Amino acid sequence: MKEIRTNFHGGTQTTVNRIVIHATVSPCTRGGAVAVAHFFQSPKTGGSAHYVVDPGEVVRCLPENVVAFHAPPNTGSIGVELCDPQKGPSSRWGDVDHDAMLQQAARLVRQIAQRWDIPLRQLSVADVKAGKRGICGHVDVSKAFHKTDHTDPGSGFPWDRFMDLVKGDQPKPEPPADPDDNPVPEFARVLKVADPMMHGPDVEKWQKAARRFSPKLAVDGWYGADSKRACEAVQREVGMPVTGVVDAETWLLTWVWMPN
């Protein structure tokens, strides 16, 4: 499991009563968990979770005995973020990427529950308020304690399907990873301002993706001053060190991050 540590957290916790399911308001795509984990490192976020899940992997942001800032009151809970835009038809939860992510998340939740002896049951708002132990959504914590107005993972979230997967009831086989399903082209080399100027189809691909952050960027396949400024815009948006150099991390985030 990949670990990308966040700096935003509280003290330690010695007991856990609830596992809280969240949604990130970002695309359900491979690489999305890494992007969200890096967002949690940004000074502008102020929030955190223990885990982020996308169709391809789980990323850990905090140890489970550390309090994350995800669904107050936070102490005694573990936050699991699922990559989902929180818009579109409810049927999206049944597509290939969402279903793969649900299976990843269900395995993770089952393992967390085993470690903390948490019953594999879905909690109602009344259950959360009463301090019962189990699994719930951020919306349930919001309604129980009125400390936030978050409604994720949303009214369309397939709780019955998810709880069946958590309990191990007739899980669907996980589809094999298909490289064609990954919207992020393969990273080939670091792109930067150089003499002679770097040029090639990889530069052109990156420029097309970077136009989401810098709409006036010319797509000409040459990495010059304009491309450097566009790279800095991407890095500034996601909270990375601003270098103007497209390394592997910047390359990935250019595709999977949703600009404001």
Image (cartoon, helix red, strand yellow):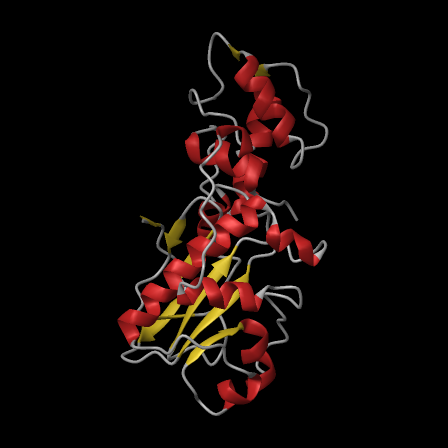
Asked which quadrant contains residue 226, the reply is top right
Q: Note whether 253 is above or below 64 in the view shown.
A: above
* Towards the viewer: 194 or 122: 122
Q: Outermost residue, top direction?
A: 196
Instruction: Count every numbered label the image shows and give the total.
Output: 0
**Residue 252 image position (x, y, % from top left):** 49, 35
Residue at image position (34%, 71%) is 113
Residue at image position (29%, 75%) is 116
* Towards the viewer: 10 or 87: 87
Q: Outermost residue, bottom direction?
A: 130
- Horizontal placement of 156 versus 18: left or right? right
Residue at image position (49%, 78%) is 72
Q: Outermost residue, front direction?
A: 170
**Residue 44 image position (x, y, % from top left):** 53, 57
Q: Is residue 7 visible?
A: no
Residue at image position (30%, 77%) is 117
Q: Note whether 174 is above or below 213 in the view shown.
A: below
Q: Note whether 2 is above or below 188 in the view shown.
A: below
**Residue 76 image position (x, y, % from top left):** 37, 79
**Residue 106 image position (x, y, % from top left):** 43, 61
